[in-house]
């Protein structure tokens, strides 16, 4: 197997959600300051020695979360139909970022979504 480089950025957004069918307090509307970690893997470097510019990863991530930021997730697609769990949000972000960033040399490898400082979920399709 050849060399692999993993680039990672961290950002955040604030949003509210209510978990449908949950047998506890989280069934009521509540908010989080979500932290998002995006890992992108490159199999080769470009002509200046980068796998993918951190700025490109940050911009793509900001575009993916701008529609979620300061919103009630239950009211916006796809979370108006699927439960806005941390797992589903992480998968949603991963798939949107993969569509935007993946190429023959670069692929999104993992999205980790922190709901609190002590609880997170990671999503990958590998």
Image (cartoon, rainbow, N blue to C red):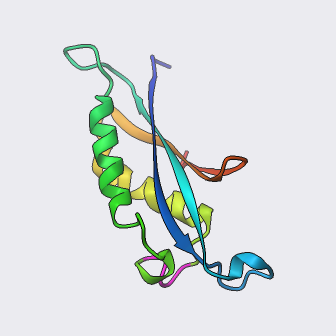
Q: Position of residue 10 (x, y in %)?
A: 47, 39
Q: Position of residue 67 (x, y in %)?
A: 34, 66
Most frequent secondary structure within the magenta stretch: loop
Q: How many marks?
A: 0
* The quarter of the displayed image where residue 34 is located: bottom right
Considering only vertical position in the picture, is 85 above or below 55?
A: below
Considering only vertical position in the picture, is 105 above or below 117?
A: above
Q: Which residues make up the magenta segment?
A: 78-82
Q: Which residue lies most toward the right here?
A: 23
Q: The C terminus is located in which quarter?
A: top right
Residue found 39% across the figure and 39% down from its top: 107
From the viewer's perspective, tell me whether residue 78 is left or right of residue 44. right
Q: Position of residue 22 (x, y in %)?
A: 74, 80
From the viewer's perspective, tell me whether residue 36 is left or right of residue 96. right
Residue found 53% across the figure and 71% down from its top: 16
* The quarter of the displayed image where residue 103 is located: top left
Considering only vertical position in the picture, is 115 above or below 36?
A: below
Q: Is residue 20 magenta?
A: no
From the viewer's side, name the closer residue of 30 and 7: 30
């Amino acid at each position: 197997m050849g060399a692999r480089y993993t680039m990672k950025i961290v950002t955040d957004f604030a949003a509210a959600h209510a978990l449908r069918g949950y047998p506890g307090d989280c069934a009521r509307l509540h908010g989080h300051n979500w932290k998002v970690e995006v890992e992108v893997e490159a199999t080769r470097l470009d002509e200046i020695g980068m796998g993918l510019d951190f700025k490109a990863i940050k911009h793509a991530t900001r575009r993916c979360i701008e529609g979620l930021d300061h919103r009630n997730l239950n009211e916006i697609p796809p979370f108006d139909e699927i439960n806005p769990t941390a797992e589903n949000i992480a998968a949603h972000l991963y798939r949107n970022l993969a569509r935007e960033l993946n190429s023959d040399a670069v692929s999104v490898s993992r999205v980790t979504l922190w709901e609190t400082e002590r609880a997170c979920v990671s999503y990958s399709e590998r």
